Image (cartoon, rainbow, N blue to C red):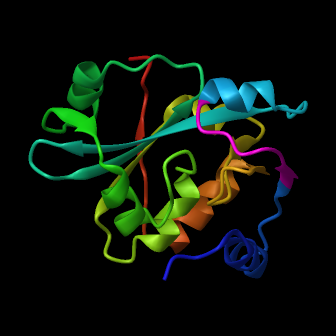
């Protein structure tokens, strides 16, 4: 059974990771998130759940304003041609619904099916803003704390310079 946001916060607390969470109306797109945003300094993310032609699953985490070309992205990460993963596959593997995709969701991928990719530029931010498994909130976390959490979940991310 997938973790809830309360389970996630308990796990973060157990690791000594400090976060700040702001509740807001449910958002399903970057544009909707921007419309409901309170002033939160740092990098705001978009998260893409993708599947390549060979069946490999990918979770791409980048800045919300970064345009992505899936063909170019595939070459950068060394994947077969990419397309968006189906909502039912997303829910089955990461335990979240469309609109709630987040790097925190790898906590639900106990089978290690998803390859996580982080945009290197995100690691230079003071804080990252992501959904806490629920698209009615945004959680701020320090990049090094996110990296530690991901490692604790067995998902060491591939760090890619998407500007290259």
- Residue 141 vs residue 154: left or right? right
- Start-end of magenta stretch: 21-29
How many marks do you count on the picture? Answer: 0
| Residue 110 lies in the magenta-colored region | no
Check if residue 23 falls in the magenta segment: yes
On the image, the x and y values in percent for residue 98 come to 49, 48
Residue positioned 59% across, 38% down in the render: 28
Q: At 40% from the left edge and 20% from the top edge, which residue is drawn?
A: 68
Q: In this view, does 111 lie above or below 70?
A: below
The residue furthest left is 54
Depth check, front residue: 36 or 163? 36
Quadrant in which the C terminus appears:
top left
Please state which of residues 77 and 113 is positioned toward the viewer in this rendering: 113
Residue furthest right in the image:
39
Q: Position of residue 90 (x, y in %)?
A: 38, 57
> Looking at the image, which residue is at 86% across and 55% down?
20
Residue 163 to residue 95: above or below: above
* Left or right: 55 as drawn, with respect to 72: left
Residue under the point 18% across and 39% down? 79
Q: Main secondary structure of the magenta part?
A: loop
Residue 104, image x and y in percent?
57, 60
In this rendering, position of residue 60 left or right of residue 149: left
Q: Where is residue 10 in the image (x, y as percent from the top left)?
A: 75, 79
């Amino acid at each position: 059974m997938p973790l809830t946001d309360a389970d996630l916060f308990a796990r973060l607390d157990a690791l000594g990771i400090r976060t700040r969470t702001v509740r807001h109306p449910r958002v399903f797109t970057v544009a909707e998130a921007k419309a409901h945003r309170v002033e939160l300094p740092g990098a705001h993310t978009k998260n893409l759940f993708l599947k390549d032609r060979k069946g490999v699953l990918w979770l791409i985490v980048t800045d919300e304003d970064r345009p992505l070309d899936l063909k170019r992205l595939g070459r950068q990460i060394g994947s077969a041609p990419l397309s968006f993963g189906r909502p039912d596959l997303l829910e089955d593997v990461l335990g979240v619904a469309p609109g709630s995709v987040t790097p925190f969701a790898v906590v639900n991928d106990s089978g290690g099916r998803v390859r996580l990719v982080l945009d290197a530029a995100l690691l230079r931010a003071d804080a990252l803003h992501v959904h806490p498994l629920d698209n009615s909130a945004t959680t701020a976390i320090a990049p090094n704390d996110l990296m530690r959490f991901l490692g604790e979940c067995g998902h060491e991310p591939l760090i890619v310079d998407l500007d290259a």
